[in-house]
Amino acid sequence: MLGSLTLTVLSLAALIPTLSASPLNILEKRTASALFAVVPKANTCEGAPFPQECKTADEAAPAINESFRTYGITSPGEAAAVIAIMAFESGDFKYNINHFPGTPGQGTRNMQYPQFNLKYAQSIPVLKDQLVAAGSDPKAVLALLTANGEYDFGSGAWFLTTQCSGAVRAGLTSGSLAGWQAYITECIHTTATPERLAYWQRAAKAMGVPGN
């Protein structure tokens, strides 16, 4: 009996390193340090044009990690793409509302268009009653998302896992330049500019994406 108990304890102990080294745990450990490499200017909000919208890397990291857990992102390639798109679109985490040119209802950290913010908000059960009150007002819908840090920084992961194809996700997981370009052009539907590329390259390197 005692021998059997000892074997059980030893078996459980052997699982601990495996659990602590899971892909998600590895990502979460990298995120905070990676953000400083990707967004070196996000060490302070001093002088931010809209201080109420600004978040530092230290403030952003827990919310981003929570989004990885919520939406099941475990590959460094996908995580790097999400971090890069949010860092670029939010002006190094300085904005979560589109001020230039000021499209009503466009925002969150990946600067989603209003129609996607509505879909995103509808996917969050606890916002159901508040969405009814918000009605068709895109600014009101956006305000529900930006008022909560986890929703605000969760938009990038939500968009990738619900709006992008399996082929695009596989390309990001591969860590290839072509995979990232497909994400930008086929899912984000914009141009893979050198400025966007620089953010992804820093993120890919910092998150340990193979080949970067």
Image (tube, helix red, strand yellow):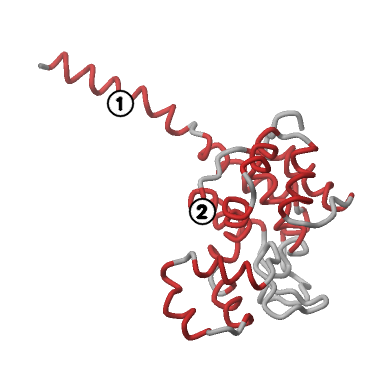
The quarter of the displayed image where residue 209 is located: top right
**Residue at image mark 1:** 12
Residue 60: which numbered mark, if any? none
Q: Residue at x 16, y 13 (%)?
A: 3
Under tag 2, what secondary structure? helix
Question: Where is 7 relative to 169, above or below?
Answer: above
Instruction: Report the residue that reaches farthest toward the right.
Output: 194
Question: Where is 49 relative to 111, above or below?
Answer: below
- Which of the two residues, 77 or 190, is positioned nearer the viewer here? 190
The amino acid beneath tag 2 is Glu
Q: Position of residue 14 (x, y in %)?
A: 36, 22
Q: Residue at x 30, y 21 (%)?
A: 11
- Which of the two residues, 189 or 205, is positioned nearer the viewer here? 189
Q: Is residue 31 left or right of residue 91?
A: left
Q: How many marks?
A: 2
Q: Is residue 9 left or right of residue 89?
A: left
Instruction: Report the residue that reaches farthest toward the top.
Output: 3
Question: Where is 2 relative to 47, above or below?
Answer: above
Q: Position of residue 2 (x, y in %)?
A: 13, 17
Q: Nearer the viewer, mark 2 or mark 1?
A: 2
**Residue at image mark 2:** 66
Check disc 2: other Cα within 10 Å, few if <14, some if 14-19, many if 20+: some
The quarter of the displayed image where residue 87 is located: bottom right
Q: Position of residue 117 (x, y in %)?
A: 61, 69
Under tag 1, what secondary structure? helix
